Image (spheres, rainbow, N blue to C red):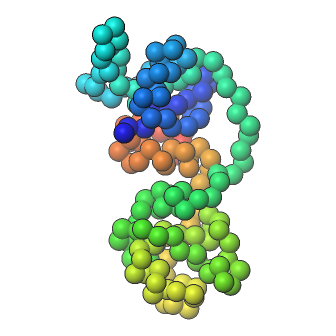
Amino acid sequence: MRDTLVLNASFEPLSTVTLNRAVVLVLQDKAVVEQAHPGLRVRAAAVDIPVPRVIRLCRYVRVPFRRRAPWSRRGVLIRDQHRCAYCGRRATTVDHVVPRSRGGADSWLNTVASCAEDNHRKADRTPEQAGMPLLREPFEPTPADAMLLTLGQSERDALPGWLARAAA
C-alpha cells in the first residue's frame, strides 16, 4: 500500500499515513492534496479525487519538539537503504560496531545494516579486529530525515523540489 506524506499546516513534515487514511482526511476536509500521483484517481459514487502523494493538514497541529530520532532496527535498515555496511549486498540484520557484550549500545552511531554472512563472520569483534572495514560510517539522522527515509527512494524522488531540499 502506498504511503502518503502528511505535512502540518505550516508545511513541516509530520508523518506518513496509508493511502486509505490520507483519503479519509481529505474527504473530511481535514487535509488538502498538495501533490498527487500522476494519472491515478480514487473514484466512488459521489467521489473523484486524485490519489494523494503529499497532503497538508488544514489546521496546525502542535508537535512536541523532538531533538533526536528514536533508534530502531527498522530505522537502521532504512537509514542504510538495506545495504550491508561491510560488503554492500542486501542487508537483513543489524550489526553492532562495538559488540553489545563489550558495552556497545543500541544507538544510531553503533549500529549498521549487515547481511547475515558478514554479521556472523564479524561475530563478537570490532570491525578492526575482524579485518572488515566499514564501507560507510553510521550517522544519526534528524527526526525529519528519519521520517522521510521511510518513504523509499522512488517516493522521495517524486516529492516536490522545495520539500526534498528542506529534508536534505
x and y percent of residue 94 in the render? 51, 70
In this view, which residue lies farthest toward the left?
39
Residue sitting nearer the eye, 27 or 13: 27
Residue sitting nearer the eye, 5 or 163: 5
Q: Is residue 94 above or below residue 74?
A: below
Residue 46 visible, this orientation: yes
Residue sitting nearer the eye, 74 or 34: 74
x and y percent of residue 12 in the render? 60, 32
At x 58%, y 77%, the residue is: 97
x and y percent of residue 150 in the render? 48, 47
Q: Is residue 17 above or below residue 73?
A: above
At x 40%, y 81%, the residue is: 117
At x 59%, y 54%, the residue is: 141
x and y percent of residue 10 in the render? 62, 24
In this view, which residue lies farthest toward the top?
46
At x 35%, y 25%, the residue is: 51
Left or right of 3 in this view: 137: right
Left or right of 65 in this view: 53: left
Q: Is residue 70 above or below residue 165?
A: below
**Figure disc tally:** 0
Occupied quadrant, residue 1: top left
Residue 160 visible, this orientation: no
